[in-house]
Amino acid sequence: MSNEASYLFYQSRNPRPFLDRGEGIYLFDENGKRYIDGSSGAMVSNIGHSNPRVLAKIKAQMDRATFGYRLHFRTHPSEDLAAKTVSLMPAGLDRVFFVSGGSEAVESAVKLARQYALTQGQPQRYKVISRFPSYHGCTFGALDLTGYDPLREPFAPMLAGMPKVPAPATYLDRDNLTEEARGLKYAELLRDQIVQEGPENVLAFVMEPVGGASTGALVAPDSYYGRVREICDEFGVLLIYDEVMTGAGRTGKFLAAEHWGITPDIVAMSKGFGAGYAPLGAIVAGKRLVEPVLDAGGFQHGFTYAGNPLACAAGLAVLEEMEEQGLVENAARMGKVLMAELESLMERYPFIGDVRGKGLLTAFEFVSDRNTMAPLPVGLDAHTRLVELAYARGLIIYSRRTRGGTSGDHFLVAPPLIITEPQI
Ligand code: PLP
């Protein structure tokens, strides 16, 4: 079928070839051409494609029941996946609410925070601070938290305009501070913002522990994470980690939060959690937050497909596969190999200004001047051109304009966690 005959649209018309099948880290188009899935799609396919054990478990659930509405039945897949998820969380995160994707997860986290505040007699708390640049999703609530101008602009008059603080874009920051001091500097910007908003009005702070598409695998200095936790505690602001991209092992720990020993109040996950075998996501919070909400009449929120047994069976099979293959550990090991390779590219090519990331969430950035980190001219459209060149040669990488969408070209390299050293 030619593209002219397509009735389907996404962000734009879709010029790509038809997908035929997947196998491990590879995808094959209808013409038999093989691609390395170097970005796990959109950082989704963590356990690789068409894993036969996972498919068998999904099939077994399909043969029993594909849907049972959660208000009509409990299901074993949803209960078992919740229990498995909690077993992989830091202590204190022991209540799970299922959704079907990342935007739903982020909005669910914010709504849980809000209802918790109401149970605490704090109805004035409603402001949710997030960072710029950032990506938290494209539904209205999640979009309002998203710090990425091209996505916001068409809808700007319709957004609430929640406050933003700068994400620690430390590769651009040319101050003379030590790493530690720089991390603290960015954390203090959050504190200033909370004070400016009136701490009694601030409900939550939402952050990606390692940035994704909007920042290009941005990792803050270590000092940032603990100080942010302290500041949130100081003002009774709930700390929400958006681990939609980083969760489920992508960075070499099950949650990226574990790298810094942080326990957020609420975690949002999706992407690698269903790993492309089902549209699936979850928020995880402590019973400290959830029980008062349930006692006060319940969470006034929920999606038709939440906790459906088919998606949950897939999610459970994915987590079991990750455990059996030791994929979180593999992500940590292979992440080091990948980072060393990216660093050697940087030595060879002066237009690579930075390489960064954690585990198998890595990125490199093109610049016209390494010293100033000035971006390449916008007209060069380097990010589209490199993505297309790689695609033509059978390698899929993921790119978006960086720096809030205004300038800069970064490329995410985030292969499935099953990748081996020769494949890297
Ligand atoms: N949050 C983060 C950190 C993401 O990376 C994404 C997707 O890229 C989302 C939220 C939104 O997820 P979804 O596209 O599944 O709604």
Image (cartoon, grey):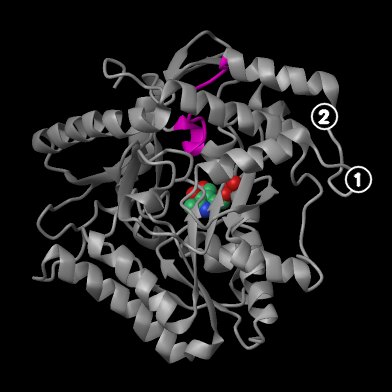
Residue lying at 87% horizontally and 42% vertically, measured from the top left: 73
User: How many labels were placed on the picture?
Assistant: 2
- Residue 92 or 406: which is nearer the viewer? 92
Residue 129 appears in view: yes
Report which quarter residue 286 is drawn in: bottom right
Question: What residue would you read off at disc 2?
Answer: 66
Q: Distance between the residues labelled 1 and 2?
A: 14 Å
Q: Mark 1 points at which residue?
A: 72
Position of the N terminus by quadrant: top right
From which residue to which does the magenta span run? 40-51
Residue 47 in view (yes/no): no
Crowding near the residue tagged with mark 2, few <14, some 14–19, many ≥20 C-alpha atoms within 10 Å:
some
Compared to residue 233, the image places residue 122 above or below, namely below
Q: In this view, does 96 lie above or below 123?
A: above
Camera-side residue of 27 and 352:
27
- Magenta span has 345? no
Q: In the figure, is residue 321 to the left or right of 360?
A: right
**Disc 1 on helix, strand or loop?**
loop
Q: What amino acid type is highlighted by mark number 1?
A: His
User: Quick one: quadrant of the C terminus?
Assistant: top left
Q: Is residue 359 above or below residue 376?
A: above
